[in-house]
Image (cartoon, rainbow, N blue to C red):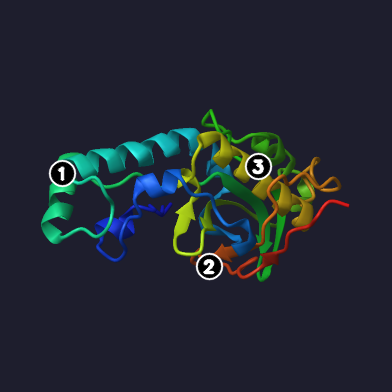
Amino acid sequence: MKLFSPLRPWLNRTHPLPSFKYIQDISPTLELGASVVFDDYIPLYKLHRQKAQSLLLSWEQQRNYVELALDIINSEEGGWLDREEVQMILDEIGPPPDACYPIYMFTVKKDNFEEVLYIGKTSSKFSRFSGGHTAAVKMHHPKYNDFEKRVYFGCVTFLDGDNHLPLEWLHPKEFSSSLIDSIESQLIHSLKPALNTQKKKNYRALHPTSIHIQNTSSDSIYLDGYMISPHQKS
């Protein structure tokens, strides 16, 4: 499965890195919305081989990589890198860590038809699919026998007006966890997957925002471009 790294554009010299001091002091502008990008999928039968990613672990990995990289090039800021600095970083600590993919989506597909059956989030503390294994068992029901069963993985990015802010760059860690729970709540409430038992009727998003779903997988455009508007509690 192809994975995205929010630090790769910095090392590829296509985008500067915002100062982490700046990131520590900033919050996403929820009025500008968020993106959930489903980069790829695996067949459902391979789910047991897939290690769920911990948001908190990914948060630490991103932070540690930047601190080591800046120490290697003797810098206290982000900004742009030159070619020599990129090579120094790669030689010392290797490529950057991948993004966390804290949202996952189970679908069934047949020809041009595709339907989401379950949306969940990985545990923020443990590497597991919270509730997902129960849903996976239910997808073995005979009524789904003629369908291809997929598991998509999504990364989440927010905006602050000037920068794209990956979920694992936001501070404090507890705030990141609260945001991902809110994103999951909005997705479930809007899409109402058949196998989700919670959050479909009761709106539980604590940080509502506009959500732009993108599907960049190689052979599906399911939900690509779908927009979810904030739904205010009554």
Cα gap from disc 3 to disc 2, whole angstroms: 28 Å
Side (left or right) of 230 relative to 15: right
N-terminal label among 2 and 1 = 1
Q: Residue at x 48, y 49 (%)?
A: 26
Question: In the rendering, at what x and y percent does residue 226 appear?
Answer: 66, 68
Outermost residue toward the left in this view: 84
On residue 181, the disc is: 3
Question: What is the quadrant of residue 227 in the picture?
Answer: bottom right
Q: How many marks?
A: 3
Which dot, 3 or 2, sits closer to the camera? 3
Q: Is the C-beta separation of discs 3 and 2 under 8 Å?
A: no
Question: In the rendering, at what x and y percent does residue 8 appear?
Answer: 32, 55
Label 2 element class: loop
Question: In the rendering, at what x and y percent does residue 58 appear?
Answer: 43, 38
Badge 1 crowding class, 10 Å Cα cut-off, few under 14, some 14 to 19, many 20 or more, is: few
Asked whether 141 or 186 is in front, the reply is 186
Q: Residue at x 46, y 44 (%)?
A: 168
The amino acid type found where label 3 is placed reads Asp
The amino acid type found where label 2 is placed reads Asp
Cα gap from disc 3 to disc 1, whole angstroms: 37 Å
Asked whether 119 or 163 is in front, the reply is 163
N-terminal label among 3 and 2 = 3
Viewer can see residue 22: yes
Label 3 element class: helix
On residue 219, the disc is: 2
The residue beneath circle 1 is 74
Badge 3 crowding class, 10 Å Cα cut-off, few under 14, some 14 to 19, many 20 or more, is: many
Q: Residue at x 70, y 56 (%)?
A: 116
The amino acid type found where label 1 is placed reads Asn
Cα gap from disc 2 to disc 1, whole angstroms: 44 Å
Badge 2 crowding class, 10 Å Cα cut-off, few under 14, some 14 to 19, many 20 or more, is: few
Question: In the rendering, at what x and y percent does residue 143 appear?
Answer: 79, 51
